[in-house]
Amino acid sequence: MINNAFKVFKKNKSIYSLISVSKTKNVNKRNFEFENGFLRLSKKNKKNYQVNGNFFFSNKKFIIKNKSFFKNKRTLGFKIHNPKYIIDIDTLKDYKKALNFI
């Protein structure tokens, strides 16, 4: 998965930033939608995609210029669908959920 994302990032010279995302049910966090493969902030309060933190790829120039891995309509989103790979362990409940995948 990470190797495939890195290949996409390196192969296409017009991509300066790539972030892993997954479907979300949480409308209270920063949500994104896709436009021509690139991420843009969702203005609507609906279920879209959320950065899952698995990986971030960017070139140094992009980060220095934007002071972020993300820029609206300039960052490619790499969708991760398998729940095994999108668990964010912040609580004991999250940890117990993650143990089910071991």
Image (cartoon, rainbow, N blue to C red):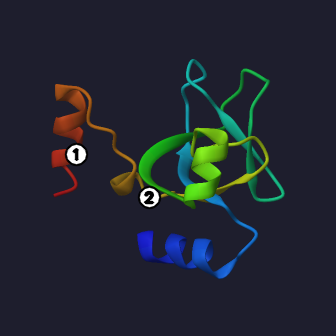
- Residue 62 x %, y %: 64, 53
Compare residues 6 and 83 and report the one nearer the observer.
6
Viewport quadrant of the C terminus: bottom left
Residue under label 1? 98
Q: For the residue carrying disc 2, how many other residues have a C-alpha within 10 Å: few (<14), some (14-19), or many (20+)?
A: few
Query: Tag count in the figure?
Result: 2
Q: Is residue 14 left or right of residue 77?
A: right
Name which residue lies at 75% across and 54% down: 38
Compare residues 40 and 10 and report the one nearer the observer.
10
Query: Visible in this render: residue 71?
Result: yes
- Residue 6 x %, y %: 51, 73
Element at label 2: loop
For residue 74, the mark is: none
Compare residues 45 and 30 and report the one nearer the observer.
30
Name which residue lies at 76% across and 69% down: 14
Residue under label 2? 82
